[in-house]
Image (spheres, grey):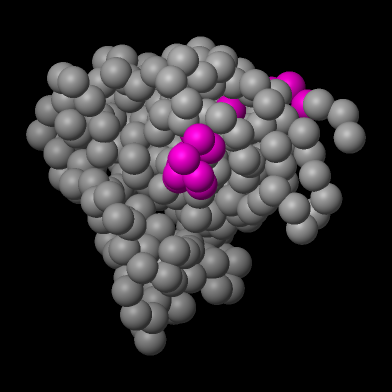
Amino acid sequence: MSAEKTIAIVLRSVEFSESSYISTLFTESAGKITALAKGARRPKSAFENALDLLSISRVVFLRKSSDAMDLLTEAKLERRFRAAARDLTRLYAAYYVIELLNALTGERDPNPRLFRISQHTLVSLDGNGDVGLDVLRFELALLHSMGQVPVLDRCIECGQQLGETRRMAFGQLAGGALCSKCRPGHRHVASLSQFAVKTMQQMIKDIDADAEFVRKDRLLETTHDLENEATEKLAPAVRGELRGLMNHRMSHLLGRRPRTSLKH
């Protein structure tokens, strides 16, 4: 039983005894793990602050058998989430990110790309990043990892290629675009603007290319391609479209509404 070293995002920590925690971590090399941190609750513990919610920490753990809990032996804080002191919106967005990671990722299923995007999302939310775009990009990366990436270039029912239109019918339950022939009879269909579609397409393209971050200049270029629409006027409406779409999609996958709701 050898020790494994990795970097981790703290998704959850619960009291196990007077001196210990059970922590759920999303790690770069091992995926999501649940580990016992003995002595973590003691004063001046070696784990001090490293297992706080939303922390990014360097950890060492002993991997146990498939039916036993891993043992966390070391944890050193790399970055603490500090935005809560100045902006609750950023805190709630970060809570939303780790809620989805905890609920929609499997135990011991490594996904370094999703980890990097999740880490970047939390760092950006803790700084001055665009909350709406940061969260949207994370959601699309999570859907990508689950094989649930939205189908936007063709009808998800019949496979017909779709050209550019001002509005696209998107089947919420089906998870993709619907052509005019397949649209009738579907429930929970959203109408997406061309810019909302292009925004998602560019983000998905960057995720496919394993980009470190979404290039916002590309999104701005896309905006300028739209005739007679000013970014300032379009942005709130588009953000509302995308947030409504993702709220519905994540609720469907979770089987419930997320505990942390986002409005933009």
Residue at far right of view: 1
Confirm whether residue 97 shows in the render.
yes
Residue 6 vertical placement versus 118 (above, below): above
Q: Position of residue 155 (x, y in %)?
A: 52, 65
Work out which quarter of the rendered image holds the C terminus and state it: top left
Q: Position of residue 247 (x, y in %)?
A: 31, 56
Q: Nearer the viewer, residue 1 or 216?
A: 1
> In screen coordinates, is 48 left or right of 197?
right
Question: So how many labels did they put on this image?
Answer: 0
At 34% from the left edge and 40% from the top edge, which residue is drawn? 95
At 71% from the left edge and 42% from the top edge, which residue is drawn? 70
At 68% from the left edge and 26% from the top edge, which residue is drawn? 73
At 51% from the left edge and 13% from the top edge, which residue is drawn? 78
Residue at far bottom of view: 185
Residue at far front of view: 18
Q: Position of residue 88 (x, y in %)?
A: 17, 31
> In screen coordinates, is 89 left or right of 233?
right
Residue 11 vertical placement versus 54 (above, below): below
Confirm whether residue 51 shows in the render.
no
Q: Which residues are magenta?
A: 4-20
Q: Is residue 13 magenta?
A: yes
Work out which quarter of the rendered image holds the N terminus and state it: top right
Q: Is residue 120 magenta?
A: no
Residue 135 vertical placement versus 193 (above, below): above
Q: Nearer the viewer, residue 69 or 250?
A: 69
Q: Position of residue 232 (x, y in %)?
A: 13, 28
Q: Please name the predominant secondary structure of the magenta segment in the image.
A: strand
